[in-house]
Amino acid sequence: MRKIVLIIHCSCYLMPVLAFAGPGVTNTWSSTNLSQSDCMVRAETVIKSMKPDSTEISNQTTIGSGDGSDGYTYFVRCVTEKQIVFFGAAGPSLDNTKLLVVTLRDRFR
């Protein structure tokens, strides 16, 4: 139950960040046993594999791509004290944001 509440809380917190990019917004989560630092390293590697020149760290928990040059913004958020990793994407096409989120999650594993 606590994970569900955390997911809802984090989704509400992150939606305004993603909403500016367009009408397509998608997110998902996965469980993890990684440490916070290992999660952040993996998240940065995944984001850089998708957008090499546009990663930023926010609050030592989130790695994201915010340049929007292709119209898409996405993130990986590590909440390892709850053993959860969030993945999200926003942009002009809902189908593409769904694909981006699946790609983020799969590359993170």
Image (cartoon, rainbow, N blue to C red):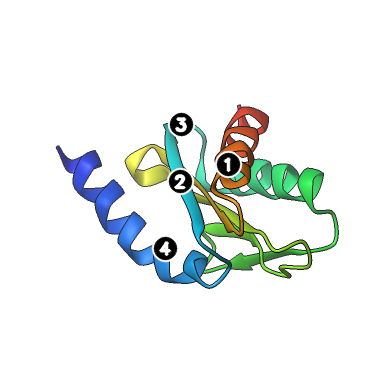
Residue bearing mark 3: 32
Question: How far apart, in angstroms, are the residues tagged by discs 3 and 1?
Answer: 26 Å
User: Is residue 78 visible to the viewer in this orientation of the structure?
Assistant: no
The amino acid pointed to by label 1 is Asp
Question: How far apart, in angstroms, are the residues tagged by discs 1 and 2?
Answer: 12 Å
How packed mark 4 is, by other alpha carbons closer than 10 Å (few <14, some 14-19, many 20 or more), is some
Vertical position of residue 34 compared to residue 86: above or below:
above
Residue 54 relative to residue 83: left or right: right
> Which residue occupies the foreground of this view, 49 or 22?
22
Residue 81 relative to residue 108: left or right: left
Q: Give the residue furthest to the right.
A: 53
The amino acid pointed to by label 2 is Asn
Residue bearing mark 1: 95
Residue bearing mark 2: 27
Instruction: Please name the residue shown 64% across and 45% down the image.
Output: 43
> Which residue occupies the foreground of this view, 47 or 25?
25
Instruction: Please name the residue shown 31% across and 62% down the image.
Output: 12
For the residue labelled by badge 1, is the local secondary structure a helix, a strand or a loop? helix
The amino acid pointed to by label 4 is Leu
| Residue 13: numbered disc | none
Relative image position of residue 87 (x, y in whole percent): 51, 45
Depth-wise, is mark 4 or mark 1 nearer the camera? 1
How packed mark 1 is, by other alpha carbons closer than 10 Å (few <14, some 14-19, many 20 or more), is few
> Which residue occupies the foreground of this view, 15 or 2?
15
Instruction: Please name the residue shown 58% across and 33% down the image.
Output: 102
How packed mark 3 is, by other alpha carbons closer than 10 Å (few <14, some 14-19, many 20 or more), is some
> Which residue occupies the foreground of this view, 40 or 47?
47
Q: Give the residue furthest to the left.
A: 1
Kindly indicate the quadrant of the structure image that contains residue 22.
bottom right
Question: How far apart, in angstroms, are the residues tagged by discs 2 and 4?
Answer: 10 Å
Depth-wise, is mark 1 or mark 2 nearer the camera? 1
